[in-house]
Image (cartoon, coloured by chain):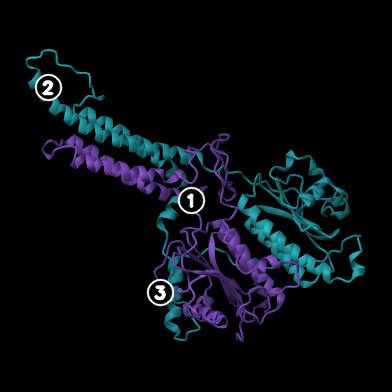
Chain colours: A cyan, B purple
Amino acid sequence: MEAGTLLRPIPLNPPPLHCPPLRRRFHFFRLLVRASSNLQEGYRGPKPKRQLVADWVSKNDDAVRSLPIYVGGVSLLAVLFNRTVAGIALVADASRQVICPSINREISYVYYKCGAYVEVNSRADLLTLGLAVTNILAGLVWLSIRPKSISAVRPQGVECQRICSDLPEYVVSEVLWVWQTLSEVTCCRSLVIVYNSRFVLQIGFAAASSSNESEAVVVDPNKLMQGSLYRSVIKSGSQSYLANLSLYPGKSELPFLPSNTQAVILQPLGDKGIAIIGGDTIRGFPTSDQAWITLVGEKLDATLTKLVNNLPLALQGRA
Amino acid sequence: MSSSLAFHSLIPLKSPFKSFASTLLPIIIPKSHTTRRKSSRISCTNSQETPNQEQLNLSVLRFTLGIPGLDESYLPRWIGYAFGSLLLLNHFVGSSSATISPAQLRTEALGLSLAAFSVVLPFLGKFLKGATPVNQKVIPEGAEQIFIMSQDISDSIKQDLAWGTFILLRNTNTISVLISVQGALCVRGYWNTPEDLSKIQALDWFEKQSQQIGLSNLKYTLYFPQSTDSELWQMLPKGTRSVLVQPVLQASGQRTNGEEGTIGFLLLASSISYSFSTKDRAWIGAIANKYRGKRI
């Protein structure tokens, strides 16, 4: 009944995913190309160019967002200033009338010339004003889609790593890979996997048990499976995302998660199991992460099904 | 190293997971292409900024014309082109050259520079945080969809490779993917293979191509967000814009001489430029880690 624990070392962190500075890498490749003539060694392909604009925009995100507004505002003022300096009326006045008919022709000719000149200038001004307004609006749109930055909340609890003891090597490496991926790429801080009424994995942060402050609360698979959260997830067959766990009354069914877990994803593994992923940020799992987790869950289901099919029947009945 | 290789349309797997191994994966638009809403709650931004924990907040007020299929982030560009050409028209046709005043010249200069700035604006906007990718994946013409895998490997590795290629095609903007780990090869998607290549020779051809470029010697991830003109990338279909090469490094427990060795690589190509965001690349690196400890 009680899940055995097995201490396994967490594998070393993989090397960082970022690309090193271009100069160093270019030097490195140069050495390779010079030193080897064998087709097997050295990379001979193209090297990626430095993305100056992309880097600059990413670094100065706020400034770039308000840049169009400043540009548009300044050019708006410049256009108006230009009109006043040039002596043209700020508003093209079409209602000027010449009253005396006798000199009407000459004056109207003069007005015609000035009017045409005013017209051309006004057209140019209007177009420039239109462009300035477009820029201001674009800047406003950029400001409005600025992502809200939410800070992570450190989970309250103890770190633990419990894996069911009689799992074969390939299952253990698979679940550890899932944990490593989720903890590095998403905001996941706790992971619990229950499959086929058996406890499989509890890793990451967990609530401290009341009896012993340094031990984590034990996951009870049967109690979990009788709860409404599990049953609704299995019935729907699709992932359930609780973006802000404190708003859900079903929180009481997950006592093993740290009490201040912010977001939870309940991923059903086929129709026999569930993976509970706890995160440290409210709405911390964007849509893309949810899609990835769904597919990772399917793979996990395939692996665990294979395990279940290969187990002798005696072990399967054990709760 | 690689002996007889054969084309398999359906890999018989004992597990119930046949969906990963089906031949032609229809290139599905990934679900992560966010839908845009007309108007929702207005969001207030938080004053504190922790760059690592940013969250895409999709419920914002957006200016949109509501025409489906029309993307408004390119509107400044079209307006820039239109108004700029109108300005030029106005300059040359609307007035005789004798009466052009300096004020008008100033205005037109200002207007043209504003038009140029508006044209560049969507390009800058693409790099802002929270920008959604605009274009859909474009299927290249003339390239065929293929799915081939080495045969002399165990079933579980085959399943892993099939799943890996499936998930990469499904969840990112990739249209072609190649995974090579310790000599085992899996190719899926649209590729520019030579005509009439016998199915047995196809994998040999891919292996030769990748060895020519030397892809298995990389130690770091290579990301080409815009199209490269190198003739070494012959096997990629036409219309490829971004390419990502992710090496698979040896697991720490298997190192014999204390150095980090590369045991394989993942090659992904897409028809959109700047298609792999930072998050995408993190996930791709995680998928590559899956093949680290495998013994083929």
Question: Which corner quadrant of the image does residue A293 belong to?
Answer: bottom right
Tag 2–tag 1 contact (CB < 8 Å): no
User: Of the residues shown, which amino acid type is indicated by label 1?
Assistant: Val
- The image position of residue A290, as x and y in percent, is 65, 53
User: Of the residues shown, which amino acid type is indicated by label 3?
Assistant: Glu
Question: Which corner quadrant of the image does residue A104 belong to?
Answer: top left
Element assignment for label 1: loop
How far apart are the alpha carbons under marks 2 and 1?
Answer: 54 Å
x 75%, y 70%: residue = B15
Q: Is residue B246 visible?
A: no
- Chain for disc number 1: B
On-image quarter of the N terminus of chain A: bottom right
Residue at the outermost top position: A100
* Residue closest to the eye, A12 or A43: A43
- Chain for disc number 3: B
- The image position of residue B67, as x and y in percent, is 48, 41
Picture disc at residue B231: 3
Q: Which residue is mark 2?
A: A108
Element assignment for label 3: loop
* Residue closest to the eye, A105 or B124: A105
User: Of the residues shown, which amino acid type is indicated by label 2?
Assistant: Ser
Mark 2 or 3, closer to the camera: 2
* Residue closest to the eye, A74 or B132: B132
Q: Which residue is mark 1?
A: B134
State left or right for residue A245 relative to residue B55.
right
Q: How many marks?
A: 3
Mark nearer the N terminus (1 vs 3) = 1
x 46%, y 70%: residue = A25
How far apart are the alpha carbons under marks 1 and 3?
Answer: 29 Å
Mark 2 or 1, closer to the camera: 2
Element assignment for label 2: helix
Instruction: Please check whether the numbered discs 1 and 3 fall on a single chain.
Output: yes
